[in-house]
């Protein structure tokens, strides 16, 4: 069976798949390949600038005057009191045109502005109308500067971002934390038209991946157990879960029940997966690549007759949906035939022995 896999690869190399040995060079190339990264995908990992007011936010405006009798001052209520010198304008939702209305100041565009910027605009509009006015603008409900978090969290929610800046794990904690197992959980961050997915453990192990969030980000936690499939002369032919975030080829063979001594070919341990053209170009420089090929099937061959291969298998990292196949030894088919003959002939021989 080993010869058949290699023969097919040699005869139809350009049209079907690539066959390569698991050696020091291949392991080195694969180990240098970058994994999924939020930091690399989104580029700007600095904290966000000061939060700006956006459409849909609720804004509260309070105006004070230096003396009673002004536009926003109430009359005196007694011989001693001078009355209120402030007015609280009811909360307003920033409309689609990005503006709110302030009495005596008119329609003011606030979208894209910070609260201090809006305060200055209102003050300028009230010059000559109010008595030495002072203005305070606050965002009572922050919609535009919030992130949506859903999926495998305890409580999905829209989480407002603080002015100091919040990271991925801050939002996850605000939503009640991860609901499933960490090693089976992946974080999917969508920002505009860009989406990146990384394992939760990567963010926990690599602080640089715990990037700052931006208003409008969507954070989805997905439970996706990683698995590989086993075929051939191994202990079990089935779908096997990783049980952890990283798994080596050595550990995968052990999880599959190991090679069956009486059936397996130690030279015929194969791992099948799809690789991007850039990876194929590195491991097999002479292989022509069609520009239309987005993923190319690759067969990695490992010979366990060589002691060095065990160390290479320990450094070879499995990926989700890999296929592990162990070929039958050349004598295994003969052994199957002899076993079948023995099974069929056994009743006949027993009958002859009894007759005698």
Image (cartoon, helix red, strand yellow):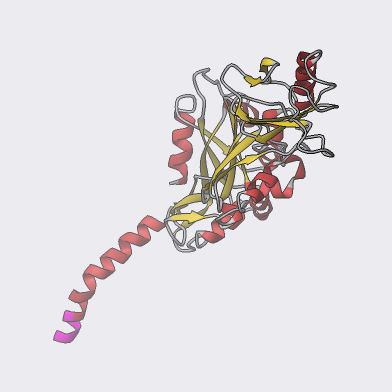
Coordinates of residue 17 in the picture (x, y in percent): 48, 31
**Res 67 quadrant in image:** top right
Q: Is residue 306 above or below residue 138?
A: below
Residue range (magenta) = 351-356
Q: Nearer the viewer, residue 286 or 160?
A: 160
- Tell me the quadrant of the picture where the C terminus can be found: bottom left
Count numbered badges in the picture.
Answer: 0
Q: Residue at x 70, y 16 (%)?
A: 105
Tell me if 338 is positioned left or right of 177 in this view. Answer: left
Residue 199 visible in image:
yes
Say whether residue 354 is magenta: yes
Tell me if 170 is positioned left or right of 329 in this view. Answer: right
Coordinates of residue 338 in the picture (x, y in percent): 32, 63
Q: Residue at x 61, y 31 (%)?
A: 216
Q: Main secondary structure of the magenta part?
A: helix
Q: Residue at x 42, y 56 (%)?
A: 237
Say whether residue 220 is magenta: no
Coordinates of residue 203 in the picture (x, y in percent): 69, 45
Q: Is residue 347 above or below residue 140?
A: below
Q: Nearer the viewer, residue 51 or 223?
A: 51
**Res 220 quadrant in image:** top right
Residue 356 visible in image:
no
Q: Is residue 233 above or below residue 7?
A: below
Q: Nearer the viewer, residue 67 or 245?
A: 67
Residue at the left extreme of this rendering: 355
Tell me if 326 is positioned left or right of 69 in this view. Answer: left
Tell me if 184 is positioned left or right of 110 in this view. Answer: left
Coordinates of residue 193 in the picture (x, y in percent): 57, 24
Q: Residue at x 55, y 20 (%)?
A: 288
Q: Is residue 54 above or below residue 227?
A: above
């Amino acid at each position: 069976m080993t010869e058949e896999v290699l023969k097919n690869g040699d005869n139809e190399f350009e049209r079907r798949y690539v066959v390569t040995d698991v050696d020091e060079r291949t392991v080195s190339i694969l180990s240098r390949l970058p994994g999924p990264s939020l930091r690399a995908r989104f580029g700007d990992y600095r904290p966000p600038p000061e939060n700006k007011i956006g459409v849909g936010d609720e804004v509260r405006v309070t105006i004070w005057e230096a003396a009673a009798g002004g536009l926003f001052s109430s009359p005196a209520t007694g011989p001693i009191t001078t009355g209120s010198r402030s007015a609280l304008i009811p909360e307003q939702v920033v409309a689609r045109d990005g503006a709110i209305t302030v009495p005596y100041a008119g329609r003011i565009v606030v979208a894209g502005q910070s609260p201090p910027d809006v305060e200055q605009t209102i003050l300028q509009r009230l010059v000559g109308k109010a008595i030495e006015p002072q203005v305070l603008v606050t965002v009572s409900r922050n919609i535009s500067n919030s992130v949506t978090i859903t999926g495998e969290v305890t409580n999905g929610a829209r989480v407002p971002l603080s002015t100091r800046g919040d990271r991925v794990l801050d939002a996850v904690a605000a939503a009640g934390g991860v609901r499933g197992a960490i090693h089976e959980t992946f974080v999917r961050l969508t920002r505009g038209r860009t989406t990146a997915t990384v394992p939760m453990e990567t963010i926990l192990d690599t602080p640089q991946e715990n990037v700052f969030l931006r208003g409008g980000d969507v954070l989805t936690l997905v439970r996706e157990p990683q698995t590989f499939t086993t075929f051939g002369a191994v202990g079990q032919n089935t779908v096997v879960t990783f049980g952890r975030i990283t798994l080596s080829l050595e550990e995968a063979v052990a999880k599959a029940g190991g090679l069956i001594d009486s059936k397996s070919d130690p030279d015929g341990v194969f791992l099948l997966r799809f690789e991007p053209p850039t990876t194929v170009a590195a491991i097999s420089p002479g292989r022509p690549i069609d520009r239309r090929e987005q993923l190319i099937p690759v067969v990695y061959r490992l010979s366990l007759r060589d002691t060095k291969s065990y160390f290479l298998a320990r450094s070879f990292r499995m990926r989700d949906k890999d296929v592990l196949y162990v070929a039958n030894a050349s004598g295994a088919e003969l052994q199957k035939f002899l076993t079948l003959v023995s099974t069929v002939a056994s009743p006949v021989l027993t009958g002859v022995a009894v007759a005698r």
